[in-house]
Amino acid sequence: VDHRKAKGYIDGSVLDRDGVLWNACWGGSVIEAYEPDGKLIRSVAMPVTQPSCPAFVGRNADRLAVTSAWSGKD
């Protein structure tokens, strides 16, 4: 994945059971999902500036939880 032209920086990541890579974009307010071949297939807007790490949760691992940070914020 070439993320150089995107907003923010790739931070924490997790793979789902289908091999899709979910990246938190620090400073980008988004979680991005990539197919195994690197194709962007989904962007999930976040209500925070600095999402830091996604994780699948729940009995069926069918919900996405995301941590965030305050670094550089008041």
Image (cartoon, helix red, strand yellow):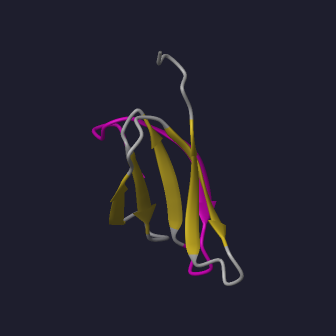
Q: Is residue 50 above or below residue 21?
A: above
- In the rendered image, residue 21, in percent from the top left (x then y), is placed at 53, 63
Q: Is residue 2 visible?
A: no
Q: Is residue 50 above or below residue 40?
A: above
State the residue lying farthest toward the right. Answer: 59
How many numbered marks have been drawn onto this rendered protein structure? 0
- In the rendered image, residue 6, in percent from the top left (x then y), is placed at 30, 41
Q: Is residue 17 above or below residue 73?
A: below
Of residues 11 and 56, the one drawn nearer to the viewer in this rendering: 56
- In the rendered image, residue 26, in percent from the top left (x then y), is placed at 46, 36
Magenta: main secondary structure? loop
Of residues 32 and 71, the one drawn nearer to the viewer in this rendering: 71
Residue 11 sits inside the magenta stretch: yes
Residue at 47% x, 15% y: name it: 74
Residue at 55% x, 65% y: name it: 64
Which quarter of the picture shows residue 33?
bottom left
Which quarter of the picture shows residue 3?
top left
Of residues 50 and 47, the one drawn nearer to the viewer in this rendering: 47
Magenta region, residue range: 1-19
